Image: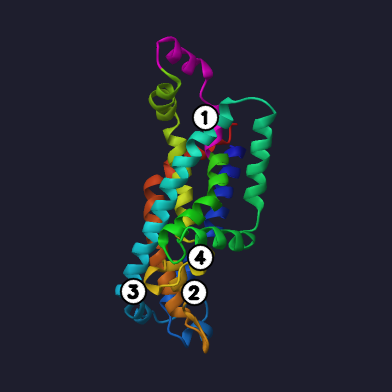
Amino acid sequence: MTRSLVARTGTGLLILLYGLPFVWLVATSLKSDTEIFSATGLIFEPTIAAYQTVVNSDLLHACVNSAIIAAGTTLLTLVLATPAAYALARVKGLLVNVGLGSLILLQITPQPATLIPLYRVLGGWNLLGTQLGVVLADTALLLPFCVLIVRPFFLSVPQEVEEAGVVDGASRWRVFWQIVLPITLNGIATGATIIFFIAWGEFLYAITFLSDPAQYPISVLIAGQIGMYGIRWSNMMAIAVVASLPILAIYAFTHRLLRDGLALGSVR
């Protein structure tokens, strides 16, 4: 009974902590410029003027750009992170500890510190000003994080299962694809969802490596509401609400997957 009460209280606090800012975001997007600073809390006369201003072809194009970058980053990150995580879960010894330590070090490296090296690399590959360059940069940023997320799921697979497949005549590659991968699919999908969420809202690499406004994702469009003569708060909040809708929709369909996957991954 006590444990249930604590769990419900914690859930309520989390909903309040994360739900209240979103409610405030939506409320601000429905206020006029004068009411943003004069209206008290949620008591105001709603207007959709901001949405009428920002919902246009530019916003749709920015959403498409964000989807392309996020999907490309997620796919490439999983292709690289999945075998790396499997290797770090199965190989034993000092090399694994060094590899895990390197991943943690890369994970805690500040993103701005990587701008100049990545700028030189992408410039050498003639990928500056392209969405592919942003995808590669985002992948480099999120790859260590994804490996650290997916590895515990491979650790949860008993090695006896793989040994049985080898005894039956399957190659190591076939064991990985037909036995291990289906078992850990829930964990890989969890990692993919988290990587997509992060890549969807990434801003620094996009604004640095892209030069054509037609290629900008929606995060840059939100920042564009900050101008020389002030901040268009209602427009900014309206774009932010629209940008959050795909993420909320994906989360609504995958929240059970995320919950079960993160719970399973935390075991190891």
Mark found first going from the N terminus, 4 or 3: 3
Q: Residue furthest top?
A: 167
Residue at image position (38%, 51%) is: 250
Mark found first going from the N terminus, 1 or 3: 3
Q: Residues within 10 Å of mark 2 (few under 14, many from 20)?
A: some
Q: Residue furthest front?
A: 124
Against 207, is 17 above or below?
above
CA gap, disc 4 and disc 3 = 17 Å
Residue pointed to by mark 3: 58
Check contact, mark 1 vs mark 4: CB within 8 A. Answer: no
Q: Identify residue type, mark 2.
A: Ala
Report helix, strand or loop for mark 2. Answer: helix
CA gap, disc 2 and disc 4 = 9 Å
Q: Position of residue 157 (x, y in %)?
A: 51, 24
Residue nearest the viewer, comparing 214 with 123: 123
Residue nearest the viewer, comparing 25 with 225: 225
Residue pointed to by mark 4: 203
CA gap, disc 1 and disc 3 = 43 Å
Magenta part of the chain: 150-170
Q: Magenta region, mostly helix, strand or loop?
A: helix
CA gap, disc 1 and disc 4 = 32 Å
Q: Position of residue 238 (x, y in %)?
A: 41, 73
Using the image, tell me which numbered label, if any, was put on residue 223: 2
Q: Identify residue type, mark 4.
A: Phe
Q: Identify residue type, mark 1.
A: Phe
Check if residue 164 falls in the magenta segment: yes
Residue 190 visible in the shown view: no
Report helix, strand or loop for mark 1. Answer: helix
Check contact, mark 1 vs mark 3: CB within 8 A. Answer: no
